[in-house]
Image (cartoon, rainbow, N blue to C red):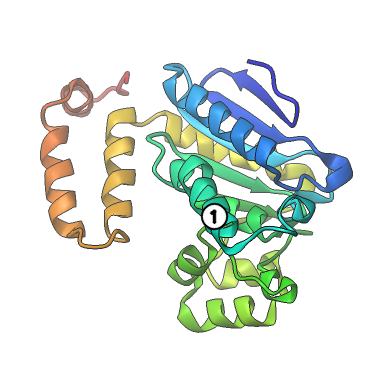
Amino acid sequence: MSYNNIITEYAEDIGYITIDRPKKLNALNKETISELHDAFEEMEQEEEVRVIIVTGSGEKAFVAGADIAEFSDFSEAEGKELARKGQQDLFDFVAHLSKPVIAAVNGFALGGGLELAMACHVRVASDNAKMGLPEVSLGLIPGYGGTQRLPQLVGRGKALEMIITGGMISANDGLSHGLVNHVVPQDELVVFSEKIASKMAKNSPLAISAAIKAVNANYQESVNGFEAEIDAFGSCFGTDDFKEGTSAFLEKRKPNF
């Protein structure tokens, strides 16, 4: 499938998605959000892909926010629909993907860009990255899950400080607060992300999918995360991956998932 605003590539068991709007600092517009949904869906269905890495083109920005010109004249109803559709089509979709997604955050990750990174399962930032949710400076609040996922990652107090001031934090500050998993020099960003992806790709895809579901269950309203874990744990016993994994362990060989 061809796209106007993103680039997709495949290499062995890793799928790569690059947001490619450098003149707009890779800002998210409706078309880009739709294309990202299609690309993630395509890679989830591609059996050979075990892990997905998403990044931005160039060295300045991962995603420097949403394309404000698209919604500057929206009504209340249109604003709600914008947030609802965006969350359903992309941000929640990525968070609940059955395959792990690594955000390789190169440069600015602001507004919708940080929200996309937070929806991913692991975040690796370049040492020049800057992250923030500046929506209050526009008379808005984050609408793509930022008010929910940021407190989950950094805690309520730090999240409120970031959201209410609208300020940016550095990659190292993000690391110290748990917003990102790793910080590396920019020229090592993709290679480092690939190393993590390779470790993931060696493990059982079915077990990874079950683990993602179980972890996410803890953040869903009216869902008992412990019960979700018990169910997911039990279901693993009925899979070929469990048989292969345990057989390989007992036979002292590497599993072939």
User: Could you tell me how many numbered marks the image carries?
Assistant: 1
Query: Where does the image place residue 98, in percent across and percent down from the top left?
Result: 37, 35
Q: Is residue 175 left or right of residue 255?
A: right
The quadrant of the image that shows the C terminus is: top left
Query: Where does the image place residue 33, in percent across and percent down from the top left?
Result: 62, 40
Q: Is residue 112 above or below residue 3?
A: below
Residue drawn 67% across and 58% down? 74
Which SS class for mark 1? helix
Observer able to see residue 11 = yes
Observer able to see residue 118 = no
Q: Is residue 32 above or below residue 81?
A: above
Q: Nearer the viewer, residue 179 or 219?
A: 219
Q: Nearer the viewer, residue 152 or 220?
A: 220
The quadrant of the image that shows the N terminus is: top right
Residue drawn 84% across and 46% down? 24
Residue identifier under label 1: 83
Q: Is residue 53 left or right of residue 184?
A: left
Query: Where does the image place residue 91, in percent across and percent down from the top left?
Result: 51, 48
Quadrant in which residue 227 is drawn: bottom left
Q: Type of residue at label 1?
A: Ala
Q: Is residue 238 left or right of residue 139?
A: left
Q: Is residue 84 left or right of residue 111?
A: left
